[in-house]
């Protein structure tokens, strides 16, 4: 699986958009970009994933560059409850348990401030 | 509500003792996973199971054992052979191509 690079920490003002970058310059053509977040002492929560097109759901938007070497997770109106560690992961979208190797790095610690 | 339930939330182990962590899911997912997380670190895969009565070692399986006798249950035993068991243990499940979903974890400490 390709490795990812994320800044260790970021701050964001409450109500503003939080833009979390991720570099994945060695991503392969069949690898997806997944985003999870982990609030302190809880299990990771799935946010969004995509292959090459931009994606949006009720939680966030995912913008993937045309060359797929980087992406940005956007939380449009950050709240205090969005304070968490955000993980960017790239991997093949295998069927079933063979996708077991979700390789979580250290992620980005996002602090949303009043 | 459907989800993944891990118990207990906190667990203490004495030296030389085996302990079993429970993971139950009512999502009808075929695949289940166990991860370990150390302070300030990402997750590392211990074991995973794609189907009942079958499981595979992950990256750090030494000192751990699992069973998958029922679709909804995937217990993890931390054996006395695991010399550094203090960690946060996370169970996850998935179906088909869908992303993994996680439980809220069990924090294991050594007395």
Image (cartoon, coloured by chain):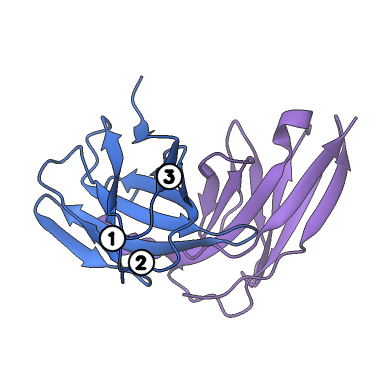
Chain colours: A purple, B blue
Q: Who's the residue at 54% across and 45% down the image?
A: A48
Structural distance between the alpha carbons of marks 2 and 3:
14 Å
Mark 3 or 1 closer to N-term?
A: 3
- Whether residue B40 is visible to the viewer of this picture, yes or no, is yes
Query: Residues under labels 3 and 1: Cα distance?
Result: 13 Å
Reading the image, the residue beneath label 2 is: B82
Residue at position x 74%, y 39% in the image: A83
Tell me: residue B60, above or below residue B101: below
Disc 1 crowd, CA 10 A, few/some/many (<14, 14-19, 20+): some
Element marked by disc 3 = strand
Residue B58, placed above or below residue A36: below
Say which residue label 1 marks: B79
Q: Is A34 placed left or right of A84 in the picture?
A: left
Question: Residue at the location (65% across, 67% down)?
Answer: A66
Mark 3: give few (<14), some (14-19) or many (20+) Cα within 10 Å. Answer: few
Give the label on residue B12, or none.
Answer: 3
The circle drawn on residue A3 is: none
Please name whichever residue, B89 or A43, is drawn nearer the observer in this view of the structure: B89
Image location (x, y in percent) of residue B21: 31, 44
- The answer to which quarter of the image holds residue B58 is bottom left
Q: Residue A63: image x %, image y %?
A: 67, 54
Whether label 3 touches label 1, CB < 8 Å: no
* Residue A95 visible within the image: no
């Amino acid at each position: 699986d390709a490795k990812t690079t994320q800044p260790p920490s970021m701050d964001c003002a409450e109500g503003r958009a939080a833009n979390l970058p991720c570099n994945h310059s060695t991503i392969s053509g069949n690898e997806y970009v997944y985003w999870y977040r982990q609030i302190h002492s809880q299990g990771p929560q799935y946010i969004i994933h995509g292959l090459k097109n931009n994606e949006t759901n009720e939680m966030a938007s995912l913008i993937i560059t045309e060359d797929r070497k980087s992406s940005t997770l956007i939380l449009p109106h950050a709240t205090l409850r969005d304070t968490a560690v955000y993980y960017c992961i790239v991997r093949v979208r295998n069927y079933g348990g063979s996708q077991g190797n979700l390789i979580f790095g250290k992620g980005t610690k996002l602090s949303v401030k009043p | 509500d459907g989800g993944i339930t891990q118990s207990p939330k906190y667990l203490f182990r004495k030296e030389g003792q085996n302990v079993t962590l429970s993971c139950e899911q009512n999502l009808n997912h075929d695949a289940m996973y166990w991860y370990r997380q150390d302070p300030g670190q990402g997750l590392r895969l211990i074991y995973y199971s794609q189907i009942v009565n079958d499981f595979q070692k992950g990256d750090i399986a030494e000192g751990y054992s699992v069973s998958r006798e029922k679709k909804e249950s995937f217990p993890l035993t931390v054996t006395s052979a695991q010399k550094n068991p203090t960690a946060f243990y996370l169970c996850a499940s998935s179906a088909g191509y869908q992303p993994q979903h996680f439980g809220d974890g069990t924090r294991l400490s050594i007395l």
